[in-house]
């Protein structure tokens, strides 16, 4: 018999990209500098999304998506402290117009990881005035783009940024708490000797996290002031910690969920109209199960999304999945993975979570951070020599789900 799991009317179905991972050609920011110093892979022209967004949105349309999440490149818009580049804002207005023409609802993340050099070199989010600096940028963006976009997220994954930048030392500004850099030792080109190691980084990490929470809260007010009717969110990366029957393992899972998720969300949720959830990882304490692996060597465990949504659902805000997806160059697990995610979202809604949408990460293969271009998350494959786009079969699996507004099997 046919089973139907149909989503609420108006559910957002789409995909996500971020500026520096796809646009190409940005040199005045911290990741590009880190690449020149040999600390992370070179970025170069990436997918050239900066020039090809029109044809990429044609693909988005062809795949049936009704929304798309982009980010704004801070270094383009505010290349010098307090000086804004009107031409770059015009560029993003054109990007929004291209979406509007194709009836694709825009979701803007104002800042997705990369920082202008003037800010990163002067201390970035270690600076005590960083919340005000960030809020000024967000206010400007909201003022300029607020007529053309309703959904603004302030920060993408603050807890990931702080731990990779100040504990593991694998992302700018490459600061490591001694002994904590192990986790990315399998990254090609990962260079132990190019990090700034020291116990002081632990204090800086805590300071940065605090400033990021303050920055979100200040940005919320700035966006609301400058864009009437804007809906403001934060995008949080959830690692689902869970456990077997053992009470000690249950305690570990509880502690880690507090440490990774609640500790931060508690500081910001009051200034969130909704919360974006990114899900990729889980850790089961005492678990003996074995899992197939993605190309990132992460467990294939889409089922964890349900627990992740319930964990943040308790803050009583509407949620949307701002990212979830899989690195799978051969495209042999992506289709089922998406179905698995969608099935979990349906269960979460049935169990009372106010979930409004899903954006697959990512529309295109792109610059996968410390891994460079090897890991392929795209619904659309990129040939980096010719920049040719090729839609992967799994993109049509997702398209079918969107056409049905759910799973019909
Ligand atoms: C980030 C993306 C990244 C993806 C896959 C997320 O944590 O927001 O920028 O590409 O994970 O690693």
Image (spheres, rainbow, N blue to C red):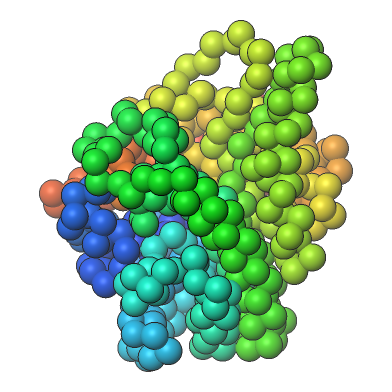
Rendering coords of residue 73 (x, y %): 39, 71
Position of 330 compared to 408: left or right?
Answer: left
Q: Is residue 363 above or below residue 89?
A: above
Q: Nearer the viewer, residue 11 or 170?
A: 170
Q: Nearer the viewer, residue 279 or 197?
A: 197
Screen quadrant of the C terminus: top right
Screen quadrant of the N terminus: top right
The quarter of the displayed image where residue 143 is located? bottom right
Q: Nearer the viewer, residue 191 or 327?
A: 191
The quarter of the displayed image where residue 186 is located? top left
Task: Please give the name of the residue rendered at 42% of the width and 38% of the height, measured from the top-left corner.
Answer: 178
Q: Nearer the viewer, residue 80 or 64?
A: 80
Rendering coords of residue 400 (x, y %): 55, 40
How many labels were placed on the picture? 0
Task: Please give the name of the residue rendered at 54% of the width and 11% of the height, measured from the top-left corner.
Answer: 290
Name of the residue lying farthest toward the top? 288
Q: Is residue 166 above or below residue 189?
A: below
Name of the residue lying farthest toward the left? 385
Position of 10 compared to 151: left or right?
Answer: right
Q: Is residue 400 above or below residue 289?
A: below
> Can residue 388 be seen in this snapshot?
no
Rendering coords of residue 131 (x, y %): 58, 74
Name of the residue lying farthest toward the front? 199
The quarter of the displayed image where residue 260 is located? top right
Rendering coords of residue 241 (x, y %): 67, 30
Task: Please give the name of the residue rendered at 42% of the width and 89% of the height, measured from the top-left corner.
Answer: 82
Task: Please give the name of the residue rendered at 73% of the width and 41% of the height, measured from the top-left corner.
Answer: 258
> Can residue 279 be seen in this snapshot?
yes
């Amino acid at each position: 018999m046919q089973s139907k799991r149909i989503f609420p009317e108006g559910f957002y179905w789409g995909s996500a990209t971020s500026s520096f991972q796809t646009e190409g050609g940005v040199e005045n920011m911290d990741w590009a500098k880190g690449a020149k110093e040999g600390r992370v892979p070179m970025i170069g022209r990436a997918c050239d999304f900066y020039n090809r967004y029109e044809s990429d949105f044609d693909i988005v349309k062809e795949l049936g998506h009704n929304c798309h999440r982009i980010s704004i490149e801070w270094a383009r818009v505010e290349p010098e402290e307090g000086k804004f580049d009107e031409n770059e804002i015009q560029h993003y207005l054109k990007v929004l117009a291209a979406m509007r023409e194709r009836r694709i609802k825009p979701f803007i993340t104002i800042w997705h990881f990369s920082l202008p050099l003037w800010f990163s070199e002067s201390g970035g989010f270690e600076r005590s005035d960083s919340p005000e600096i960030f809020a000024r940028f967000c206010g400007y963006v909201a003022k300029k783009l607020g007529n053309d976009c309703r959904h603004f997220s302030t920060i993408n994954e603050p807890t990931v940024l702080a731990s990779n930048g100040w504990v593991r030392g694998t992302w700018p500004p490459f600061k490591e708490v001694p002994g904590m850099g192990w986790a990315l030792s399998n990254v090609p080109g990962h260079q132990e000797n190019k990090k700034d190691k020291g116990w002081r980084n632990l204090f800086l990490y805590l300071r940065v996290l605090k400033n990021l929470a303050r920055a979100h809260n200040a940005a919320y007010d700035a966006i609301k002031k400058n864009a009437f009717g804007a809906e403001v969110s934060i995008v949080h990366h959830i690692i689902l910690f869970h456990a077997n029957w053992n009470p000690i393992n249950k305690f570990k899972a509880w502690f880690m969920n507090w440490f990774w998720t609640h500790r931060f969300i508690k500081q910001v949720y009051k200034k969130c109209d909704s919360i974006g959830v990114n899900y990729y990882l889980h850790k089961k304490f005492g678990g003996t199960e074995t899992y197939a692996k993605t190309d990132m060597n992460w467990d294939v465990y889409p089922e964890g999304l349900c627990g992740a949504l319930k964990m943040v659902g308790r803050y009583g805000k509407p949620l949307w999945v701002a990212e979830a997806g899989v690195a799978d160059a051969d495209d042999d697990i992506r289709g089922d993975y998406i179905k698995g995610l969608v099935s979990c979202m349906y269960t979460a809604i049935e169990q009372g979570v106010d979930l409004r949408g899903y954006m697959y990460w990512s529309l295109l293969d792109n610059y996968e951070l410390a891994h460079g271009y090897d890991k392929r998350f795209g619904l659309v494959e990129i040939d980096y020599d010719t920049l040719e786009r090729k839609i992967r079969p799994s993109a049509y699996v997702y398209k079918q789900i969107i056409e049905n507004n759910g799973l019909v099997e």
